Image: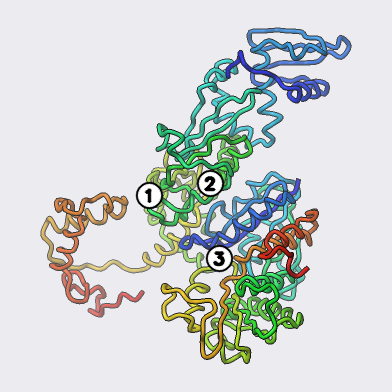
Amino acid sequence: MQSLVIVAHGSHLNPDSATPTHTHADTIRATDAFAEVRTGFWKEQPSLREVLRTTHGDDIYVVPLFISEGYFTERVIPRELRLEGWKPELWNSDGISADTATLVAGDIDTEVHYCGPVGTHEAMTDVLVRRAESVTDDPEVGNGFGFAVVGHGTERNENSAKAIEYHTEQLRKTGRFDEVKALFMDEEPAVDDVTDHFDSEDIIVVPLFIADGFHTQEDIPEDMGLTDDYRNGYDVPSGVDGHRIWYGGAVGTEELTADVVLERAADAGADIGDAIARVRKQTSPTTQAVGE
Amino acid sequence: MSVAGVALSATQLAAFREQLAAEPIEYDGLAAEYDAAEDTYHIETPDHQTSLGGDELDTAADEQAAYLSNWYFHTQQVTTESKQAFCRWLELADDRPVPTRYDDLEAGIGREWGELMITTTLAADGGRRYEIRHVDDSGVDDDALTPHTDPFAARDIGTLDTDGRYRPLRTAPSLDSGWIFPELTADAVYDAVEAFYPATIVNWHREQRGELDVDHWRDEQDRQSGIYNLITVLPDEAVEWAAAACCDDSQCLKRREWQLSADEPLAAEGGDGVFPCRAPCSTVVAAGREWAKLEREDTQTYEFELTPSEKEQIEAIIDAVADGTVDEIREADLSEGANRYRARYLREKRFDDDGTLSGTPTRPDGHNDDSD
């Protein structure tokens, strides 16, 4: 019996923090690819410490709904899940290539497959594209558009910037958008100066964040000049310095992120049948499955 | 539906036959075995002893049919140990023999789990159906409540309180009312309860088996890293205050089982909740971090001018905030110290232009700095 456990940060202050986790769990639950889909949180309930005991399966896949490898995925989650013998080297990662490690979880004395975070999976590039399509309401968007992928920067975690750069390069390789740039909140090139970095009149801006919160809903819109006060809202697109900014908010809220969770589990050996194709189709804003 | 009305289905009888072909059954007062040589089923319940031929099983007497359906539901339909234990608890299975229980299930057996009222009733085939509503809605007509069928809807119901404020602690006694899950299966009632109160069933079940693993405060301290390392410096007496402040039944419905350490019990009340709290939660740890910062300050001696009533008023304001009763104080009830007009009057009278009580400097050097 296969179980999927999605682990995420959660929040004591922001009820929206856990929303993507629950939404993606619901999407995957509806595919019946897993006998059960459970969620666990650092800041909410059930805690990471207790989530594994809520499972009943004997083939358990744990997927962190986090953007990058770092403190949480390498230290906090394995510790709280009590993954015996865990060390980051088991992922054999260069900072963005973690796949899976199989270890016994002390809490349930059962092996679990501990997967890399969703944010560094190649399929997350598709989610960025899907967000570009949904924010512009144009399944063919690309020509004439610039695309800014926004991250925190290296101040807190150098792998965070690596993930941004990775997807930026992946997007660039598709050749779909006229320009693709990585921008950051706390280092150069800065998202504050977004219009300085693009020639394209239309710029899609998507933060590589899991959930909407203070940074994506308040800081970034104000920093880019979409609004003087986030409480007053902003238009999509908004005119800034002769450009049109199509601000998409946290990419992790895009429904297609459920697909990346499935990809992670499948990479770790889960038998999920055609669930990925079904999720791609189901979450598509148009009748066609975009990108297929 | 009672003992007299249980109609066994072909599926139930097939499962019964299959089980007895492998081994005898002893469950909840039912003892049954199959004699292959005679092709006969021997079925014994407290008041009946019957032997039936291989093709006569469906003629089992009403009471025995009830026992069979009881075995089938609890062992074949409910599939995991924690769900089985929970479903048995819900219908008081350990306290009431099958005939009595089936009679009671006709009207419904209700049990409280936190702020949930969960009522078990019998289905026509002797299976079970579950209803969940808020305990405060116990006497409310079903029609007056918003019905739900998806057990995971419980997650959204539990996200905000009556006033629309976020409930970061799902076991806080602030669950909104006005909804009903009128008919859930055993699997669905489990999922709904777990969505309302995550991990409570499995921890309760561990406790029932004498296997609850408690992480005490010192275990929690030792495990922290990053910014939460700070809780290692929280004084022991502050842990006592923190437990009294956060883990009281008025704040959380879990029954606190964690102590300072296994050998160092806390004096604070742990509460009377049905499900245990096995470790300081993230709310307590985050609060502990703030208190660790605050407890690093040394005390100062201040001199204030207050009338006796003003001193009592300050105490009343702290009580009202701590007990969450501010909103209950009527606008014009100036006999209440925490009344808004009373508080505004006190501020006008006793605060200086910088918002400092009695103009007394907060810092000993006279420099008023509240930035940290």
Residue type at mark 3 is Ser
In this picture, residue B171 sits left or right of residue B38: left
Cβ–Cβ below 8 Å for labels 1 and 2? no
| Residues at discs 1 and 2 both on one chain | yes
Which of the 4 image quarters holds residue B225? bottom right
Q: Residue at x 69, y 29 (%)?
A: B75
Q: Quadrant of the N terminus of chain B?
A: top right
Q: CA distance from mark 3 to mark 2?
A: 33 Å
Q: Position of residue A200 (x, y in %)?
A: 63, 89
Helix, strand or loop at disc 1? helix
B368 sits to left or right of A279: left
Split into 4 quadrants, where in the image is the C terminus of chain B? Answer: bottom left
Disc 3 on helix, strand or loop?
loop
Question: Which of the two residues, A284 or B26, is positioned nearer the viewer here?
Answer: A284
**Within-10-Å neighbours for mark 1: few <14, some 14–19, many 20+:** some
Check chain identity for marks 3 and 1: say if they share one: yes
Give the x, y percent position of residue B122: 59, 24
- Residue ID for mark 2: B154
Whether residue A69 is visible here, answered yes or no, is no
Earlier-in-chain disc, 1 versus 2: 2
Q: Amino acid at mark 2?
A: Ala
Q: Circle 3 sits on which residue?
A: B225
Name the amino acid type tagged 1: Ala
| In the rendered image, the vertical position of residue A233 relative to residue B94, given as above or below | below
